[in-house]
Image (tube, coloured by chain):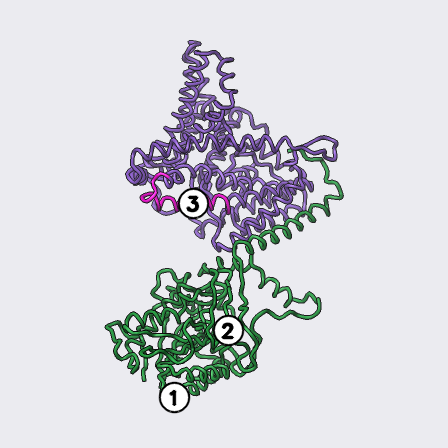
Chain colours: A purple, B green
C-alpha cells in the first residue's frame, strides 16, 4: 500500500473510525497494533519475507531492555555497534561481502526509519530519558507506526508515548486543519511533483538538441520536485495521524528560504537532521572538546563535527559510491559554510558579519547559492556516475558552466521574489472573532476555498492522466 | 497559524458553502477557459431543411466551422450544394470524375477541405494519372438508408467514372429505416424538469468535459475497457454477432445491393471503402485484446457483402493502423477522422483505385501494393 493512494486514505479512515469506538488506552493500543501489522502485511505475501525486519525490531527491544537506565554500561557501546551492524547487513551495504547477505528477498520498507527510532530509544532509555518502562505493544506501535513507517517523520518515543496515553482531542478546527494537510499533501505529490518530474524527464530527452535550456531544467528542477514529493508525503501522514490523534513532528520549514546551507539543513528533513545533531553532532563535539581543550580549536572542532554529521546524512541515503560522494558534498557544504562563518567572524567581527547577512541583496544571493549547491549535490542523489558523465558530454563544459550560473541567477531572483510576495501577503490582515488581526492568508475561509480547489484539480488531473500518483522518493531509503 | 479554540457555529454552514461555491466557480472557470481556448462552431450555416434528405447545403454557400478538438475551417459548396470546389456541371474534357458518397466521414466533417478524403483523392489521382481528376463530394452526415439511395441517383446524374461509398461502423449501426432523423442544432427539451437526461445533456455540451474526455480517451488503458462497457453499440467487436447486429448487417447488405444495382445499370464501377471507428482502430493496435474481442469481424462481414454484390472493397484500416501516432488520426471525443487520418485514408483508396481494373483509371497503374479485395 502506497501512501499517496486512495487505498491508504480508506485504510486510515477505517482505523480512525474504529479508534473512536472506545477510549480506553488498551483498546487504542490494540487497534493501532492491528492497523500497523495490517499495513506492513500489505508489502509482501510471504510471511518469511518479514522475518528479518521482525528480527531487527525484536533485537532493538531486547537491547533497549538490557541497557535501560544505565544498565550494562560496558556492553552498551557493543550493543550499539551490533544494532548498527545488523542494520547495514539487512540494508545490504556494498561493503558487506555478498556471501554474508541473506539470499532470499525480504521486506525492508521503513527499515531506515525503524532503525532511527530503535537507536534513539536504546540511547535515551540507557541515559534514563525514557521515564516509563516501554511495553512491547507500545514499542511495536512506536517503531512500526503505519503513518510514518515508510518515510518518516522520525518521532521521539517520548512524544509518541504522549499521544498514546493522552491523545490530543480532535476538534472541528483540528479536523479541518488535518484534512487541509492531507489535501495539500496529495496536491503536492500528485500534481506539482508529478508535473515537475515529467518536465525534468522531458528535458533529459532534449539535452542534445537544446543543451542550455534542457540542462537548466534537468539540473535546476530536481530540488523542487524532491521538496514537493517529500513534503507532500509528510503533509499527508501528519494529517492522517492527526485523525488517529497522533501528533507527528514537522519535517520541513520553508527550506528554500534558508540563507545558508547549515540553516537549510535545519529546515529540510528536520527530523533526520535533528536526530543526527542529537546523536552524532552533540556527542562527537563533546568527545572532541574533552580531548582537545584549546579554546581556538573549538570552532574547527565544530566544523569537523558538522562535516561528519552531514556526511552521514548523505551516506544514510544509500549504499553506493554515488551516495558516499553525496554525503561528502553535504558534509563538505555544511563544513565550508561553517568555516566561512568562522573566518568572516574573525575578519569583520560577529556584529559586522550579522550586518552583512542582514543586507537584502546578500541574503538573496545566499539563498540562491544555497539552492544551487543543493541542486548540484542532488546530481549524486538521483543519477549515477554514468548518467552524470552522459550529462556532461551531452551538453559540454561551457554549457555546464552557463547552466549552473543560470540556476544561481534564477534561484536568487525567484526566491527573492517569493520572499517579497510572501511578506506582502502576510501584511494583508483582517480582524478575526477573537478581536485580533491575522493574515488573510491564514483565514480558514480562504484555506477552505483553496483546499477545495486543490481537491478538484487533483481529482480531475489524476482522473485524466489515469495513472497512480508518483511514489515517494524517500520510501526507497 | 492562529486558530480560535472553537469553531463559530456559523462556520458549520459557512465553510461547506464556501466549498460548494468554490466547486461551482472552479467548474465555471474551467468551462469558460475551455470555451476560450477550444472554441467550437459545430453547426453548418449553409444547411437548409430538405424533405428528401433531411437537409442539404445551399448552393454556392460558404460556412465556417470548428470542432473543439480541431482547427477552424471553411466549408465551401458548389452550385449543387456539394463540398467540392469544381462545378457539378458536365465534367471538362479529359477530366475523370469520381462521385463520393457516404455520411460525415465522406463529407470531411470537422476537417479543412485540403485534408479531406475528397480533396486528397483528387490530388493524388491527378498527380499519378497525369490527367485531371475531380471528386464531387456528395457525402453529408445524414446520408443513410433511403437517403443514400437518393444521393446515389444524384451521383449517377453527374456521369461519374467511378462511384465511391465510404462506410463506417456508425453507418451500419444507425437505423437505416429512419427517413429524417433530426440533424443540426441539438433538441431543446420543453419544460424545466431537471431529469437525468437534461443533466446528462448539459454535461455532454460542456466544453470542459469535452476537452477532459479528449485527454482521457488518449489513455488506452482507460478508453478500451470504458468503450467495451457499451452494450449493443460495441457488440460489433464481439463475435458472433448479436441478433440486432445481424439485422443491421442484413439491412446494410440490402442497401449495398440496391446501390450496386443502380451503379451496374448505369455502367459505373462502385467502390466501397471501410473506415474504422476510433474504437475499432484502438483495438486493432492493442498488443493484447480482451477475451472475445475481434476488431476485424465487422470488416469481414461488410467485405463479404461487397463481394456478394460485385462491389470493389477497400479497407483503409491497415494504412491507419501503420501510422505511428494513432491517437492523432481521430478527434478523440468527436470520433471523426481528423485532418491527419483523412489523407491516410485517401492514400489507401487511391492505391486501391490505381491497382483496380477501372477503365477510366486503366492508364494510371503503378506498382503500389493493392488493397483491393474484389474488383469488378
Label 3 element class: helix
Q: Tell me which segment is drawn in magenta.
A: A191-212
Is residue A183 found left or right of A288 in the rendered image? Answer: right
- Mark 2 chain: B
Lateral position of residue A142 relative to residue A440, left or right: left
**Dividing the picture into quarters, in which one does residue B282 lie?**
bottom left
* Residue A86 visible in this rendered orientation of the protein: no
Magenta residue check for B367:
no
Q: Is residue A101 visible?
A: yes
Residue B162 placement, left or right of A56? left
Q: CA distance from mark 3 to mark 2?
A: 39 Å
Chain to which mark 3 belongs: A
In the rendered view, does B1 fall on the left or right side of A409? right
Q: Which residue is rendered at x = 58% and y = 55% of the image? A: B31
What residue sits right under mark 3 in the picture? A199
Chain to which the residue tagged by mark 1 belongs: B
Toward the viewer: B198 or B4?
B198
In the image, is residue B326 above or below residue B300? above
Instruction: Say which residue label 1 marks.
Output: B266
Query: Which label is found at residue B233?
Result: 2
In space, the residues marked 2 and 1 are separated at their CA atoms by 36 Å
- Is residue B291 or residue A319 the one in the foreground? B291
What residue is shown at x 41% (from left), y 37% (from top)? A220
Q: Which mark is residue B98?
A: none
Q: Residue B198 location, x and y as percent? A: 64, 66
Q: Residue furthest right?
A: B9
Residue B232 is situated, as x and y percent measured from the top left of the image, at: 51, 75
Amino acid at each position: 500500500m502506497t501512501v499517496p493512494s486512495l487505498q491508504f486514505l480508506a485504510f486510515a479512515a477505517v482505523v480512525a473510525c474504529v479508534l473512536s469506538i472506545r477510549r480506553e488506552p488498551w483498546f487504542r493500543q490494540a487497534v493501532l497494533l492491528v492497523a500497523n501489522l495490517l499495513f506492513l502485511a500489505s508489502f509482501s505475501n510471504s510471511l518469511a519475507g518479514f522475518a528479518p525486519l521482525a528480527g531487527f525490531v525484536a533485537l532493538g527491544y531486547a537491547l533497549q531492555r538490557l541497557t535501560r537506565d544505565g544498565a550494562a554500561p560496558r556492553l552498551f557501546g557493543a550493543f550499539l555497534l551490533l544494532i548498527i551492524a545488523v542494520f547495514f547487513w539487512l540494508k545490504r551495504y556494498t561493503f558487506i561481502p555478498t556471501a554474508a547477505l541473506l539470499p532470499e528477498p525480504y521486506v525492508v520498507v521503513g527499515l531506515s526509519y525503524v532503525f532511527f527510532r530503535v537507536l534513539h530509544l536504546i540511547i535515551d532509555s540507557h541515559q534514563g530519558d525514557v521515564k516509563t518502562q516501554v511495553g512491547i505493544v507500545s514499542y511495536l506501535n512506536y517503531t512500526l507506526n503505519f503513518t510514518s513507517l515508510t518515510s518518516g517523520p522520525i518521532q521521539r518515543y517520548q512524544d509518541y508515548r504522549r499521544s498514546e496515553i493522552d491523545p490530543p482531542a480532535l476538534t472541528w478546527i483540528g479536523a479541518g486543519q488535518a484534512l487541509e494537510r492531507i489535501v495539500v499533501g496529495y496536491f503536492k505529490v500528485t500534481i506539482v511533483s508529478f508535473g515537475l518530474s515529467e518536465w525534468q524527464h522531458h528535458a533529459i530527452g532534449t539535452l542534445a538538441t537544446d543543451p542550455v535550456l534542457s540542462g537548466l531544467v534537468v539540473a535546476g528542477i530536481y530540488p523542487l520536485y524532491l521538496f514537493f514529493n517529500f513534503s507532500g508525503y509528510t503533509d499527508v501522514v501528519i494529517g492522517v495521524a492527526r485523525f488517529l490523534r497522533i501528533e507527528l513532528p514537522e519535517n520541513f520549514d520553508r527550506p528554500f528560504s534558508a540563507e545558508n546551507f547549515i540553516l537549510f539543513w535545519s529546515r529540510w528533513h528536520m527530523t533526520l537532521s535533528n536526530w543526527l545533531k542529537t546523536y552524532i553532532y552533540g556527542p562527537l563535539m563533546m568527545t572532541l572538546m574533552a580531548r582537545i581543550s584549546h579554546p581556538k580549536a573549538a570552532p574547527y572542532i565544530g566544523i569537523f563535527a558538522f562535516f561528519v554529521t552531514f556526511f552521514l546524512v548523505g551516506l544514510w541515503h544509500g549504499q553506493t559510491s554515488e551516495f558516499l560522494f553525496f554525503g561528502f558534498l553535504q558534509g563538505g557544504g555544511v563544513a565550508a559554510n561553517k568555516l566561512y562563518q568562522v573566518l568572516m567572524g574573525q575578519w569583520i567581527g560577529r556584529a559586522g558579519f550579522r550586518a552583512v547577512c542582514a543586507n537584502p541583496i546578500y541574503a538573496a544571493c545566499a539563498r540562491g547559492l544555497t539552492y544551487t549547491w543543493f541542486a548540484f549535490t542532488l546530481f549524486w542523489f538521483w543519477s549515477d556516475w554514468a548518467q552524470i558523465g552522459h550529462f556532461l558530454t551531452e551538453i559540454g563544459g561551457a554549457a555546464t558552466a552557463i547552466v549552473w550560473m543560470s540556476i544561481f541567477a534564477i534561484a536568487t531572483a525567484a526566491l527573492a521574489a517569493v520572499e517579497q510576495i510572501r511578506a506582502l501577503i502576510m501584511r494583508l490582515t483582517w480582524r478575526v472573532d477573537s478581536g485580533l488581526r491575522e493574515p488573510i492568508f491564514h483565514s480558514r475561509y480562504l484555506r477552505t476555498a483553496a483546499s477545495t480547489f486543490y481537491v478538484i484539480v487533483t481529482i480531475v488531473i489524476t482522473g485524466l492522466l489515469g495513472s497512480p500518483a508518483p511514489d515517494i522518493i524517500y520510501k526507497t531509503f | 497559524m492562529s486558530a480560535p479554540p472553537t469553531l463559530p457555529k456559523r462556520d458549520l454552514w459557512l465553510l461547506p458553502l464556501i466549498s460548494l461555491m468554490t466547486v461551482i466557480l472552479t467548474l465555471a472557470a474551467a468551462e469558460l477557459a475551455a470555451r476560450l481556448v477550444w472554441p467550437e462552431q459545430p453547426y453548418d450555416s449553409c444547411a437548409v431543411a430538405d424533405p428528401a434528405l433531411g437537409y442539404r447545403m445551399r448552393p454556392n454557400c460558404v460556412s465556417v466551422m470548428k470542432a473543439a478538438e480541431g482547427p477552424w475551417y471553411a466549408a465551401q459548396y458548389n452550385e449543387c450544394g456539394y463540398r467540392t470546389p469544381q462545378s457539378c456541371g458536365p465534367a471538362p474534357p479529359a477530366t475523370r470524375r469520381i462521385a463520393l458518397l457516404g455520411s460525415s466521414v465522406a463529407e470531411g466533417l470537422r476537417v479543412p477541405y485540403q485534408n479531406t478524403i475528397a480533396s486528397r483523392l483528387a490530388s493524388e489521382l491527378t498527380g499519378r494519372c497525369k490527367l485531371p481528376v475531380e471528386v464531387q463530394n456528395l457525402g453529408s452526415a445524414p446520408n443513410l438508408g433511403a437517403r443514400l439511395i437518393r444521393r446515389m441517383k444524384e451521383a449517377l446524374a453527374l456521369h461519374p467514372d467511378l462511384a465511391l461509398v465510404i462506410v463506417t461502423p456508425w453507418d451500419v449501426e444507425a437505423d437505416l429505416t429512419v427517413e429524417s432523423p433530426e440533424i443540426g442544432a441539438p433538441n431543446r427539451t420543453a419544460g424545466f424538469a431537471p431529469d437525468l437526461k437534461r443533466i446528462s445533456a448539459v454535461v455532454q455540451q460542456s466544453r470542459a468535459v469535452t476537452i477532459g474526455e479528449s485527454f482521457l480517451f488518449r489513455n488506452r488503458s482507460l478508453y478500451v475497457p470504458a468503450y467495451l462497457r457499451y452494450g449493443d453499440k460495441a457488440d460489433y467487436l464481439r463475435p458472433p454477432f448479436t441478433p440486432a447486429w445481424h439485422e443491421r448487417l442484413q439491412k446494410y447488405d440490402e442497401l449495398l445491393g440496391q446501390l450496386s444495382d443502380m451503379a451496374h445499370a448505369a455502367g459505373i464501377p462502385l467502390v466501397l471503402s471501410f473506415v474504422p471507428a476510433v474504437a475499432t482502430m484502438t483495438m486493432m493496435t492493442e498488443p493484447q485484446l480482451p477475451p472475445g474481442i475481434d476488431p476485424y469481424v465487422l470488416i469481414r462481414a461488410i467485405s463479404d457483402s461487397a463481394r456478394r454484390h460485385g462491389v470493389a472493397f477497400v479497407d483503409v484500416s491497415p494504412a491507419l493502423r501503420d501510422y505511428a501516432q494513432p491517437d492523432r488520426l481521430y478527434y478523440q471525443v468527436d470520433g471523426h477522422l481528423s485532418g491527419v487520418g483523412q489523407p491516410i485514408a485517401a492514400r489507401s483508396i487511391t492505391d486501391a483505385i490505381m491497382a483496380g481494373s477501372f477503365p477510366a483509371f486503366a492508364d494510371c497503374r503503378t506498382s503500389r501494393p493493392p488493397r483491393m479485395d474484389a474488383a469488378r
